[in-house]
Image (spheres, coloured by chain):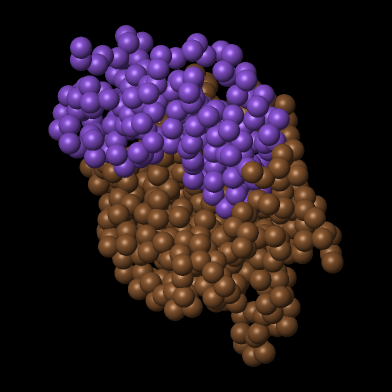
Amino acid sequence: MSTIDTTCLLTDRYALADSFTYAVAEKAGAYATARKVLTGMQPDAIKAEVKAANIRGRGGAGFPAGVKWGFLPPPDPNKPVYLVINADEGEPGTFKDRTIMEKDPHRLLEGCIIAMRAIGAHTTYIYVRGELVTSIKRLEQGIRDLRAKGVLGKRPFGIDHAMDIHVHPGGGAYICGEETSLLNSLEGYRGEPRLKPPFPAVSGAFGMPTIVNNVETIASVPDILKLGGAAWSALSRLPNDGGTRLYGVSGHVKNPHVFEGPVGLTLREMIDLCGGMLDASRPLKGVIPGGSSTPVLRPDDLVHAPDAAHPLHAWHGKSHLDVPMGVDTMRNLGTMLGTCCAIVMDSSVNMVEAARNLMRFYHHESCGQCTPCREGTGWLAEICDRIADGHATEADVELLVDVSNNMMGNTICALADGTAMPMLAFVRKFRGEFLAAAREGGVKNGRLDQAVVPLLGGRAA
Amino acid sequence: MPFQLTPERDKHADELFTRYPTKRAVCIPLLHLCQEQNGWVSDDVIEYVATRLGLSTAQVKGVVTFYTMFHQRPVAPNVVWVCRTLSCEIRGGKTIQEHLEKRLGCHAGETSADGKFSLRKAECLAGCGQAPMLQLNDELYENLTLAEVDRIIDAVAAKTPTQAAPAASHAAAAKE
C-alpha cells in the first residue's frame, strides 16, 4: 500500500498550545487570507474559487458548496442575506466539528468572514449544540476579540462591508441538524423541519435568503482561497470531490480519533491510521462509514462491477472497505459518505443489539411531525426490542423491512430515510443474526460492551 | 413571587435582543439564561419568558418541551448525562452507567439519595472517539474508566453542600 498522506491544512494549528486563542491563531497565520481576499478580490471571484475547489458539503449530504452559494437570488436591499453555520453536531459516531470549534475556532470565524463577503451577507449565526459548552465559550471569546480588533464591525480590513457573527446555542435535539429545522430553532420555534421548496437560499432564516453550511465546510474556505480553488481540489484522490477533509474513527480500534487526509482514503486505511483493530483476536465485523444514518458495510462483501462503464469498476472484486471514501463512490456502493466519521465494530458486537441501540436513538429523536417517521421509528425500535428479547417470530424480521420501506420518501425531512436505510442494511447484511434471534428466543448476550469491560477496570454486573 | 433575572443576567438578556431581527429568536438563549439561574424551567420561568417575548405561555411551553436540555422538573445541582449511543455503548457506556447507578444509589432519570446528583441517559454527545464519555454539568469527561468516574464524582460531591430531601423531585423525575 502506498504511504498515506495526511496533509495538515485544516488541522495545522491543532497541536499549538492555546491554539484556540486569537493571539496564537493570528501568529500562526489566521486572518492573513481573509485580509488578502477582502481587500483584493470581488465576491464573484471568491465564489468562483470555492466552486473550482469542488468542495462537497461536510455535513452529510455532500452537496457542492460552491453550487449552493449560486442559488441565492439577485441582491435586494430589502432582503438581507444570512449565513448560518450548522454546528449542531449530533449524528451518532460524528465528533469532527467539535475539534474545529474547540481547537481552532478562528479558522471557522475566518471562513465566515470570507463567506459573508462572497455571498453578500452581513450577519452570521453559528448554531452550536447547546451541550458543547466549551465550543460555545471559545467561539464567543473569539468573536469578542475580533470585534475589539475591528475585524468584525463596520469596516473589516477597511472595506465597506459591515460584518458580525453571533453564536446561537441549541436546546438539545438531533433533528436541529436538519437545515430547515435548525432555522426554525434559530427563530425560537420547536425544531420541526419545513417543507421545501422554498429552499433556504430563497427563504431561510427570518424569511430571508440564507446559506446554511456545515462547520468544516466553512472552516475549509480560508485554505481554498489561500491555495486557489483548483490547487485545493487537486489535493483529493477523487474527481469532483475536492480537497482534504476530517476523518473520524470510533469504536473498536486501538486509537480512535479525528485526523485530516485527502478526500478518498479507504475505510481500511482509516482503521490502519487508528492503530488497527483494538484486539487482534476479535476480527472486524462491520463498519458504519459516515455516521449512524449511513448503511453498514461488511469487510467480506466484495464490489461487483464487471462492466467497464460502472463507476466502481476500478474496484471490481475488492472489499467494500477498499473503495475510496467519497460522496459518489459511497453512494454507488449503496451507502453514504455522510460525515465521514466511521464506527468500527468487531466480532463482539451483536448486530441485532447494535440496530436496536440506533433505532432507540431515532425513536427518541423523531420530531413527531410526520406520521410515517413518528410511528415508524417507534415500531422499528419496538420490533428490535422484541427480536432481541426473544418475543419475536421470523415474520418480525420481514416486518422491519416492511416498516422501513413505508417510511422512505414519505416524510418532510430525511430523518425517516436516515432511519430506514441503516435498518434495511442491518437486516440485509446480517439477516442470519436477526433470524437466529427471532428463532432461538432472543439475543443470548445483549451487552454491547462485554468485550471492553476489562479496559474500564471493572466487571460487568 | 414572579421570576426575575438577576441584574447582570438581565443586562445579558437585553444584549441578546440586539442580535436578531425578531424578539422570538431570543427564546432558546433566554431559556438557557433562566435555567442557569433557576436550575430548571418552572411555570414562573415560562411566564417570565412569554411576557418578555410577547408570546403566550403555551408557545413557550411548546419550545421547552421540544428540547432535552430544559428541565421541566427540579433537578439536583449536578446533572450527569451518560452517553448510551452506539459508539459509546460498544466501548463501555452501559458499564459506566451501571457503576454510577450503584455509586449514586439511583437509576437513570432519578436523583441520588443525598440530593447532589441527577442521573440521565444521553444520546450521542459528539465525543465518539473518546468513548466512553459523560457530561457533568458543563463539562465533558472522556476516555472514562471506573476509577476516573469515581474521581470525578468525588471531586464534585465534595464541592456540593448536602441537599434537602429530594423525595418529591425523585419520584417526579423518574417518570421522565
Q: Is residue A382 left or right of residue B26?
A: right
Please count the marks in the image: 0
Residue occupying the point 35% across, 73% down = A406
Viewer-proximal residue among B47 and A128: B47
Question: As displayed, is residue A42 above or below residue B99?
Answer: below
Residue occupying the point 41% across, 71% down = A404
Q: Position of residue A346 (x, y in %)?
A: 71, 61
Q: Position of residue A12 (x, y in %)?
A: 71, 40
Q: Position of residue B128 (x, y in %)?
A: 61, 46
Question: As displayed, is residue A229 above or below residue A299?
Answer: above
Could you tell me which quadrant the N terminus of chain B lies in?
A: top left
Q: For chain A, what colour was chosen?
A: brown
Residue occupying the point 37% across, 64% down = A379
Could you tell me which quadrant the C terminus of chain B lies in?
A: top left
Q: Is residue A111 left or right of residue A212?
A: right
Question: As displayed, is residue B10 above or below residue A420?
Answer: above
Give the quadrant of residue A417: bottom left
Viewer-proximal residue among B148 and A132: B148
Give the quadrant of residue B149: top right
Q: Residue furthest bottom?
A: A307
Q: Is residue A165 left or right of residue A9?
A: left
Residue occupying the point 39% across, 21% down = B166
Query: Can residue A33 be seen in this snapshot?
Result: no
Instruction: Give me the chain that's purple.
Output: B
Give the quadrant of residue A313: bottom right
Query: Can residue B89 be seen in this snapshot?
Result: yes
Q: Position of residue B45 (x, y in %)?
A: 26, 23
